[in-house]
Amino acid sequence: MKDRPVDSRTLIAEDPSPEVIDKGTEEDPAFAKRATDLQALREAVVDAANVGGGLWLSYLFIFFYLAIAAGGVTHRDLLFENQVKLPFLNIDLPLIGFFVLGPPLFVIVHAYTLLHFTLLAGKVRDFDAALRQQVGDLDTQALLRRQLPIRAKLALAGSVGCCG
C-alpha cells in the first residue's frame, strides 16, 4: 500500500489490488484468501438471500396490517378520536398514538428491508465479479448462476443487468 492518509472514502472507493488479496494477511492467510473464493462468496449470497425471504414477508405483513388497521378508521372515529381496534389482536389503541407510531414503524421496517437487499445486491455483485474473473467459459458461468436461489438471481439481475 502507498504511504498516504487514509479516510473512509478512500477505503470505500478503492478496491484492493490482486497482489494484496493473494498475499492475505500475516495473521491468517487462509481466511484472507476466502475473499475471492467462489464457494465462500456463493454461501454468503445464499445465506443473505434466505434471510431476505423472511424479511420480505415480514415487511409485507407489517405493510398490510397497518393498511388494514388504518383502513378501518372512519371519519367518525377521527372526529371523536375513538380508539383504533387492531385487527386479529382485538386491542384498542389511542387514535393519536396509532397514527403517530404507525408511520415511523413502517419507515423503519422499510429502511431495514432496503438496507438488507442493498447488501444482498453487493454480495451478488462480488460473486458475479469473481465468477467472471475465475471462470472463463460463459456457459459454465450461466450454469453456476442458475444454482443461486431465485432471490439472489433477482438481485443479480438488478445489480449487473439481466443479460450481462
Image (spheres, rainbow, N blue to C red):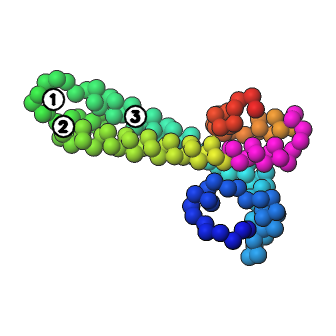
Task: Name which residue type carries label 1.
Answer: Leu
Q: What label does residue 151 carry, if any?
A: none
Quadrant assignment for the C terminus: top right
What residue appears at the point 19 percent right and 24 percent down from the top-left corner?
Answer: 74
**Would residue 137 be counted in the magenta stretch?**
yes
Task: Name which residue type carries label 2.
Answer: Leu
Q: CA distance from mark 1 to mark 2?
A: 8 Å
Res 91 seen here? no
Quadrant assignment for the N terminus: bottom right
Q: Secondary structure at mark 1?
A: helix
Q: What label does residue 95 carry, if any?
A: 2
Q: Earlier in the sequence, mark 3 or mark 2?
A: 3
Q: Quadrant of residue 90?
A: top left
**For residue 110, above or below residue 35:** above
Label pair 1/2, CB-CB below 8 angstroms:
yes
In the rendered image, residue 8, in percent from the top left (x then y), is placed at 56, 61
